[in-house]
Image: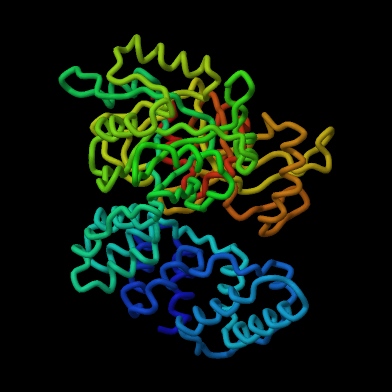
Amino acid sequence: MLFAVVVEASSQVGATRSRKAKTAALAAVLAEAGPDEVRPVTAWLAGDMLQGRTGIGWRTLSGLSVEPAVEPSLSVVDVDAALDRLAALAGSGAGVGARRTAELEALLGAATADEGRFLVRLLGGELRQGALEGLMLEAVASAADVPGDAVRRAFMLSGRLPETATVALTGDDPVAELGAIGLEVMRPLRPMLASPGDSLEAALAELGAPDGDPGVVVEHKLDGARIQVHRSGDEVRVWSRTLHEITSSVPEIVALVSELPVETVVLDGETLAVAEDGRPRPFQESMKGLGNGAMRPWFFDCLHRDGTDLVDEPLETRRRELAEVVGDRLIPGVVRPTPEQAADAVAEALAAGQEGSMVKALDSTYTAGRRGRSWQKVKPAHTLDLVVLACEWGSGRRRGWLSNIHLGARGADGEFVMIGKTFKGMTDETLRWQTETFPQYETHRDSYTVYLRPEIVVEIELDGVQTSTRYPGGVALRFARVVRYRDDKPAAEADTLETVKGLRPM
């Protein structure tokens, strides 16, 4: 396959807001890809590279001046091999830099102008075209003509989109082969996420059993860092919410899990920094605490225990297994509470300094992402995880600082839609961090505003949402204020426009 086919598909995806049209364009190029082309093509169309970071920054890319090719000749295999060579040229030094520049010039010199622009954006981490994971999974299912649920489950268990696409598109019996992908200890799986709950009462009513059985557990919602921990014999490994391995940064968690009464286990949980009185420290301190031995873990799910996979078991079973494994490291909660007991549990969580509570259906299985509402987070005030689209320069006391942020939610087509602005809740430290950090994500600017790649997630507290024509999303946020920046959360997990609109008064 010519690389130009991939570039054209990317252009089509970026030119439309229709989710159906995006999926069709992606599916068409995936269906055309050969067995050795599916992995790189899938990664590129999702804005990633199989090689991960290559160490090539914008200073290197912007300093290149290469005459583009007139006609397309690069193949997918050619480009993937060139990226392999670039990734192998790690490190610094004049010799390495010269070889890297020569390799880049050779690649871009063989590329047409359109192909070169795509490559520069891909290498620079700026290839954001709405082809998020959910959209790519739909395209894979369409191209392979297999059920979407089979693709999503295989992706959850493998944690790898290109590999999932390869099985679906090249297998002799793709449905069976996708179904054969199971949980592997020491291979992280995609985490299950919670949806915002309207209130404790609403969550209890929605998730409770029809026969009057409460059917839920109400747990503390910790303001910490999500962790996934795997153990096999004497080996323990730990991954973050985004599946980046952090084992070396959390020796205290490794030591704790090494002593648990199991041979193999996969745990889902949260770790946070605590003060001398045992109360949790702010989220940013938990993130900074990774690596200083000051973290304290709690676990809320058990996905595997001693040779038995539990992802398809109801939460009630998983939680029972979890309690037997982790003992007092089980996250505090109350099972099948009365409304009064549930309210007491929420009050207890808040009194302990936690950010709220989780209400979970006891009959729910473990499903990656935020599919359905079987886990709901209940907080004293509404909070949303949104993406920073731009930031305006401040005035008065804030002159010289990047201050007023433009907020975006994920639209149905995967693009981010602006729904408001805020400069409230920002400390001097926040302003300093924004001013230092945001230019690293800059796409362009004018005299008032710096526009950013939609990658930075911020947690926003608000009093409500109202219909408005002021912003493209058709809604506006009431009294929005910054709570924290979510270093642990990718933009693909930001709240959707549909979720935001759901907070409007009926």
Where's the N terminus, which quadrant?
Answer: bottom left
Residue drawn at point x = 44 percent, y = 53 percent: 414
Looking at the picture, the colour scheme in use is rainbow
Where residue 466 appears, x then y in whole percent? 49, 29
Q: Is residue 244 above or below residue 360?
A: below
Residue 63 appears left or right of 239: right
Residue drawn at point x = 31 percent, y = 54 percent: 152
Where residue 167 appears, x then y in whole percent? 29, 68
Spot the residue most to the left: 211
Task: Report the label total.
Answer: 0
Residue drawn at point x = 70 percent, y = 50 percent: 438
Residue 316 falls in image quadrant: top left
Question: Who is closer to the viewer here, 185 or 70?
Answer: 185
Where residue 450 appears, x then y in whole percent? 71, 51
Q: Is residue 65 above or below residue 308?
A: below
Residue drawn at point x = 61 percent, y = 18 percent: 277
Residue 146 falls in image quadrant: bottom left
Question: Who is closer to the viewer here, 467 or 405?
Answer: 405
Residue 408 falls in image quadrant: top right
Residue 104 appears left or right of 23: right
Where's the C terminus, which quadrant?
Answer: top left
Where residue 103 appears, x then y in whole percent? 64, 83
Residue 145 appears left or right of 494: left
Q: Is residue 418 above or below residue 61?
A: above
Q: Is residue 504 above or below residue 134?
A: above
